[in-house]
Amino acid sequence: MVEFRYDTQLLIDGDDLDEDEVAEYITEHFQGDSLLAVGGDGDPIKIHFHTNEPWKLLEYCRSLGEIYDIIVEDMDRQSRGLKG
């Protein structure tokens, strides 16, 4: 079994987003690993994060702007050879 079950990926489109500030907030407020926050400066920010509570991450990201291209994959299922 994996420690953080859900591979969560999405794009955030909002005003004046800073990927460093977003990454810092996620690191301080959510349990997980493998965080990537890339983009900003007028472009959408791509988030990649492994967590057990993807709905909380989605809720936070939605508070920043429009979220889309959302992917939540169950890595535990994938490790057992099942579709995630």
Image: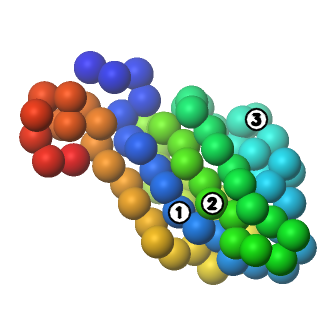
Q: Is residue 19 visible?
A: yes
Amino acid found under the numbered disc labelled 1? Leu
Q: Which residue is mark 1?
A: 10
Label 1 element class? strand
Q: Which residue is mark 2?
A: 46
Q: Residue 11, image x and y in percent?
A: 59, 67
* Residue occupying image coordinates x 75% and y 45%: 23
Colour pattern of the rendering = rainbow
Question: How far apart are the two marked residues, 3 and 1, measured between alpha carbons?
Answer: 19 Å
The disc, 2 or 1, on the residue closer to the chain's N-terminal end is 1
Question: How far apart are the two marked residues, 2 and 1, measured between alpha carbons?
Answer: 6 Å
Whether tag 2 and tag 1 are in contact, CB under 8 A, the answer is yes
Amino acid found under the numbered disc labelled 3? Glu
Q: Is residue 25 visible?
A: no
Q: Is residue 42 left or right of residue 12?
A: right
Disc 3 vs disc 1: which is toward the camera? 1
Q: Which residue is mark 3?
A: 28
The image quadrant that residue 27 belongs to is: top right
